[in-house]
Every structure is written in structure tokens, then in C-alpha cells.
Image (cartoon, helix red, strand yellow):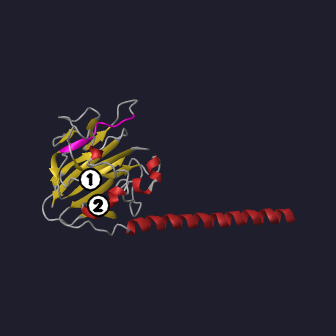
């Protein structure tokens, strides 16, 4: 009889505390969800003027492969999105695309979706020249990444939304691989201001030229790259990092 009482007591305790754990976890998950939602208060400022579409969802008009006249076959258009799908057994980049037009001061809005374990990026200030070979030698990058599975997710200033290798996102609001994220990048040399919003949350702020910018570069992997981040005017680029990635709703306002 005593043994039965003990067993019943254990079952009751497990059930009770197990239920408490589930309720606590549900509450915790709800708090996390609400916390993320509450952080979408950093409203993107209204900018005078009209948005100009950089991608019409139907063609690559306005874009070309870096140092090429057209866009390579690994880039396709699917469901109003430009999709990069690397060829089989390919482990290097080289098919980055850039805008035909150059920009100086602007607000850029772009949706991106990364594959599991994937890596890509959004460049600005890109100089197109045989001297540089690839966009990242001149253009700073806002990181596009699957934080959960890619090794770069372990490095704070390499995570999605970061000013790559220079400033980590202040909050982690990126959505999981396979889901769309909206990135808004503001670059204004008139006010020496750079800002990044990811999914409506302001996560990165930085100077875009001068001593503050130079200090960021000097504390990064780019410190010995003589042409990195020194040009105020340049092309916007999307990176081929040998992983599948999609972009859509690309638009810009010049300041």
C-alpha cells in the first residue's frame, strides 16, 4: 500500500511540475514573441519623394553581372523574385550582380530570403573595375545569413543585418531560413549617417565617411584593403556566395 502511495505521489508530482514547465515554457515563448513584436517601434522615417523600383519582378533590366554586360544563367526570376541558384559542385562566388546606375545618398528597401546554411550580402558604393575583380573589395556589405546553421552566425558582427565585420546587429530579429526578411538601408553622406532596419527594427547605426568610418574599417578585416569603403558614389550589389538566395521588392529613394 505504501509503495502504491509513493508511486501515485511521484506520478502526481511529475504531472504537476511537468504541467507547470509546459505552462512556463508557453509563457516564456509568448514573452519572447511579444518582446520581438514590441521592438518593431523603430519606425522607418518617411522620406520625401517617390520610391523608384530597381527590380520589376519580370526582368533583370537595370542589373548586370559584375564586369559583364548581362546577368548569368544562375540568376533566374521565380514568383516575382530574383533567385540565385549555384551550379552543382560549385564552391566559389563570382556571379555577383550590380545595378547599372550608381547612387550616393539613398534609402534602399529590399526583401531577402536565404536557404538553409546560406550566406549572401547587399553591397553599396561598389566600384566596377578590372582592378577590383569582385564587388566586396570596394563595397561595404549588409550581411544576409542563416544565423542558425552558417558558421558566421557564431560571430556577432557577421550575423544577418550586421554591417559585415564592423558592427553587430543590436537585436536579433532575423526570420528563419526560407522566410522573407525586409532590410532597409539608409546611406546619407550629407548627414554622415548610415542606418539598417531589419523587419522594421533599427539594428545598426554608423558613420558613412570620415574618422568614424575609418576607425570602423581599421578595426575590421578590411583595414589593409586600400579601396574599401572610400567611394561615396557607387553601384548597389547582390552577392553570389555560392548559396541559394532570393531577393524581391527592391526599391530606392535618392536623398
> Residue 243: percent from the left, percent from the top?
37, 40
Badge 1 element: loop
Q: Is residue 79 visible?
A: no
Q: Is residue 130 visible?
A: yes
Q: Which residue is mark 1?
A: 229
| Structural crowding at the residue carrying mark 2, measured as other residues with C-alpha within 10 Å and reported as few (<14), some (14–19) or many (≥20) | some
Precedes in sequence: disc 2 or disc 1: 2
Please identify the dominant SS of the magenta region: loop
Residue 94 counted in the magenta span: yes
Q: Residue at image x 34%, y 66%?
A: 40
Q: Residue at image x 52%, y 67%?
A: 27
Badge 2 element: helix
Q: Nearer the viewer, residue 231 or 240?
A: 231
Q: Residue at image x 50%, y 63%?
A: 29
Q: Quadrant of residue 10?
A: bottom right
Q: How many marks?
A: 2
> Residue 6: percent from the left, percent from the top?
81, 65
> Residue 184: percent from the left, percent from the top?
27, 58
Residue 234 counted in the magenta span: no
The range drawn in magenta is 91-99
Q: Which residue is mark 2?
A: 213
| Quadrant holding the C terminus | bottom left
Q: Nearer the viewer, residue 196 or 211?
A: 211
Marks 2 & 1, CB-CB < 8 Å contact: yes
Q: Residue at image x 30%, y 40%?
A: 83
Q: Is residue 180 above or below residue 242?
A: below
Q: Nearer the viewer, residue 136 or 64?
A: 136
> Residue 224: percent from the left, percent from the top?
33, 49
Amino acid at each position: 500500500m505504501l509503495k502504491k502511495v509513493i508511486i501515485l505521489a511521484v506520478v502526481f508530482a511529475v504531472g504537476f511540475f511537468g504541467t507547470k514547465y509546459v505552462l512556463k515554457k508557453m509563457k516564456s515563448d509568448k514573452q519572447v514573441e511579444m518582446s520581438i513584436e514590441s521592438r518593431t517601434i523603430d519606425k522607418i522615417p518617411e522620406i520625401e519623394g517617390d520610391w523608384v523600383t530597381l527590380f520589376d519582378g519580370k526582368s533583370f533590366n537595370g542589373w548586370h553581372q559584375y564586369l559583364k554586360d548581362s546577368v548569368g544563367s544562375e540568376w533566374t526570376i521565380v514568383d516575382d523574385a530574383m533567385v540565385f541558384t549555384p551550379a552543382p559542385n560549385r564552391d566559389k562566388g563570382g556571379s555577383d550582380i550590380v545595378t547599372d546606375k550608381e547612387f550616393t545618398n539613398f534609402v534602399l528597401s529590399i526583401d531577402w530570403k536565404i536557404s538553409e546554411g546560406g550566406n549572401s550580402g547587399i553591397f553599396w558604393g561598389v566600384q566596377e573595375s578590372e582592378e577590383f575583380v569582385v564587388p566586396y573589395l570596394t563595397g561595404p556589405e549588409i550581411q544576409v545569413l542563416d544565423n542558425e546553421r552558417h558558421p558566421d552566425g557564431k560571430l556577432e558582427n557577421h550575423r544577418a543585418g550586421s554591417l559585415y565585420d564592423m558592427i553587430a546587429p543590436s537585436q536579433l530579429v532575423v526570420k528563419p531560413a526560407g522566410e522573407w526578411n525586409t532590410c532597409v538601408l539608409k546611406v546619407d553622406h550629407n548627414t554622415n549617417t548610415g542606418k539598417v532596419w531589419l523587419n522594421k527594427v533599427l539594428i545598426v547605426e554608423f558613420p558613412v565617411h570620415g574618422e568614424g568610418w575609418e576607425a570602423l574599417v581599421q578595426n575590421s578585416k578590411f583595414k589593409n584593403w586600400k579601396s574599401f569603403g572610400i567611394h561615396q558614389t557607387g553601384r548597389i550589389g547582390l552577392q553570389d556566395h555560392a548559396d541559394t538566395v532570393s531577393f524581391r521588392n527592391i526599391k530606392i529613394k535618392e536623398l
